[in-house]
């Protein structure tokens, strides 16, 4: 589940987020069985094929920019958006079908 608990946790996305993107690559804390497993990346659907924003997703325009104003930058917020386990970008960490987190990366 992807959740934005505060304004400071919203995801600032650089390009095409406000009007055109269907997915966002979101980095966030991964909590498994109450344990923080660190930051991982997830592919999160934000719109359907007709560009209608999915329930639980809030997309805000980041406003006028000094340069490249034609790019529709956005800030994204998520309200308990459920995504499939397989949407985790799992090169360095994964959660298996039983809900167990694993990673070959050693904590320093």
Image (tube, helix red, strand yellow):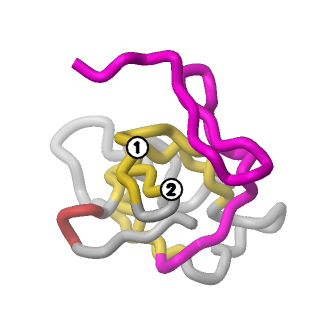
Q: Residue at x 36, y 51 (%)?
A: 36
Q: Which residue is mark 1?
A: 37
Residue 74 position, x and y percent, is 39, 57
Q: Is residue 51 above or below residue 15?
A: below
- The answer to whether 50 is drawn above or below residue 26 in the figure is below
Total labels drawn: 2
Residue closest to the eye, 78 or 89: 89
| Placement of 80 over or under 67, stated as above or below | below
First to last magenta residue range: 79-108
- Is residue 87 located in the magenta-colored stretch of the structure? yes
Mark on residue 7? none
- The residue tagged 2 is 32
Residue 6, horizontal then vertical, whole percent: 24, 74
- Classify mark 2: helix, strand or loop: strand
Of residues 65 and 43, the one nearer the viewer is: 43
Q: Residues within 10 Å of mark 1 (few under 14, many from 20)?
A: some
Return the x and y of residue 52 as percentages of the image width and height.
Answer: 71, 74
Give the x, y percent position of residue 49. 83, 61
Helix, strand or loop under label 1: strand
Does label 2 or label 1 sit earlier along the sequence? 2
Label 2, residues with CA under 10 Å away: few <14, some 14-19, many ≥20: few
Residue 107: within the magenta? yes
Q: Nearer the viewer, residue 32 or 91?
A: 32
70 with respect to 57 (left or right): left
Q: CA distance from mark 2 to mark 1?
A: 7 Å
Task: State whether the magenta stretch is mostly helix, strand or loop.
Answer: loop
**Is 69 on the left or on the right of 81, as rendered?**
left
Label 2 close to label 1 by CB (< 8 Å): yes
Q: Is residue 92 above or below residue 67?
A: above
């Amino acid at each position: 589940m992807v959740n934005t608990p505060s304004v400071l946790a919203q995801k600032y996305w650089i390009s095409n987020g406000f009007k055109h993107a269907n997915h966002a690559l979101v980095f966030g804390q991964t909590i498994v069985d109450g344990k923080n497993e660190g930051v991982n990346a997830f592919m999160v659907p934000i719109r359907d094929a007709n560009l209608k924003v999915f329930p639980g997703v809030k997309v805000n325009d980041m406003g006028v920019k000094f340069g490249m104003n034609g790019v529709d930058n956005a800030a994204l917020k998520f309200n308990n958006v459920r995504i499939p386990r397989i949407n985790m970008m799992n090169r360095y960490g994964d959660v298996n079908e039983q809900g167990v987190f694993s990673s070959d990366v050693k904590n320093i």
